[in-house]
Image (spheres, rainbow, N blue to C red):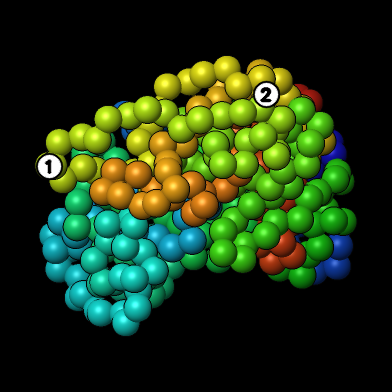
Amino acid sequence: MRRAVLILVTLVATAAAGFQAIADQDNCTLKGLASLEITTSTDGWALVPVQLGSTTLEFAVNPAQMFSMLTESVAREQQLKFVTIEGFYERTAFLGMTKFIAMSPIRLGHADVQGTNFAIIPRQIGNDPRVAGILGLDVLSAFDVLLDFAHSKVVLISRKHCSLQGVLQGPSVPMKITNWFRIPVQVNGRNVEAEISGISASTYVNPHSAMENFGVEVHAPAFADEAAAVQPLMPHGRITPAIKLGINTITVDGIAISNPITRVYDCEDAPSNYRITCDSLPPLELGISELQKVKAYLDFQDGLFFAMPADASPAAGASPE
C-alpha cells in the first residue's frame, strides 16, 4: 500500500507536467496526463475545467453518469452541429433532454479527447450558472482516474503494459458499468452496491430498498410540486435535507467511513415533472462528503476500484521507487 501511495502522490503532484512514473513491471508506465483542480458549485458538485474549442468551461465530474452532457446554450455559443439520434430521447426523457447530441473534441489538462458526444440539455444543469455540462463515464473511462476530493484534484492517468494488482499493493473491489456504474460496499456490515458521484454533496439512500439493504424504513421527502417554470436539471432529483437514518458505517474497499451524512432521494413510484422514479436510482449513492475520506483509483482497463486513506502521504524525501 505504501508503494501505491508514493506513486499516486507523485502523479498528483506532477501530472500537469506530463510526468511519467515507471513501475517495476517490464515496460510498465503510469503517466499523469492531467491534474484537474476541483472547485465546488453552489449545489456542492465537483467542477473541473474543460477546454471546449478556445473556451475553458466548468463541468461537473460524475462517473455515475453514463454519458456526458452539455447545455444547449453553450453548444450554440460554440456553434456545434446538432445531430439527431433515433431513440435517444425515449431513453433519456426523464432527464429533460432533447433528442440531439453534439460532437466536439475537448481538452483536459494535457489530454485530448476526440469525438466526444454530448447529450444536449435544453435547460440549466444544476442551480449554478457556471456549470456548462457533466463529464460522464464515456469520457472518464478513456483513462485511469484518481479521485482525490480531499485535496480538490481529479487526476487522469495513462497506463500501458501494467497490471495494477502488481503496482498498487493493496486490496481492490470489482467495478460494474453495465447500465450504471457501481462498486460493492458494506453498510452497517451489509453488502450493498453503490454509485460514486461528483454531483451529490453527501450520501443518498433509495427509499424503495432501504429496509432490504440497510435495515431501516425510509420514506421519500414530502416535497410540494414547484411552480410550472422550467426547473434546472438535477440528474438524481432535488436536493433533500440531511437526516439521520441509522447508518453508522460505510466500508469502501476495506476503509470504514463513520457517521456518513445521509439524505433520501426525492423520488416516487411513477415519473412526474418533478420527480424521478425510485426504481431508476441506485440503492446507495456515495457523495463528496464521504468520498473526501478516501483516495479512489478507478482502473477502467481491468474493471477494478482501489481505495486508500485520503490523508495518506509519502515520508519526507520518498520517491515513487
Quadrant where the N terminus sits is: top right
Sooner in the amino-acid sequence: mark 1 or mark 2: 1
Amino acid type at mark 2: Ile
Q: Secondary structure at mark 1?
A: loop
Q: Position of residue 19 (x, y in %)?
A: 61, 52
Say which of 320 and 264 sits in front: 264
| Residue closer to the observer: 233 or 68 | 233
Q: Amino acid at mark 1?
A: Ala
Residue 154 horizontal/vertical position (percent): 53, 44
Front residue of 178 and 110: 178
Label 1: how many Cα within 10 Å (few below 14, some 14–19, many 20+): few
Left or right of 216? Residue 179 is left
In the picture, the disc for residue 262 is: none
Q: Position of residue 50 (x, y in %)?
A: 35, 52
Q: How far apart are the alpha carbons under marks 1 and 2?
A: 36 Å
Q: Is residue 121 depicted above or below 312 in this figure?
A: below
Q: Which residue is mark 2?
A: 247
Residue 248 in view, yes or no? yes
Residue at position x 76%, y 28% from top?
Answer: 188
Look at the image and tell me whether residue 37 can be seen.
no
Kindly identify the residue that appears in the image at 42 percent across and 41 percent down. 267
Question: At 15% across and 68% down in the image, what residue appears?
Answer: 79
What residue sits right under mark 1 in the picture? Answer: 229
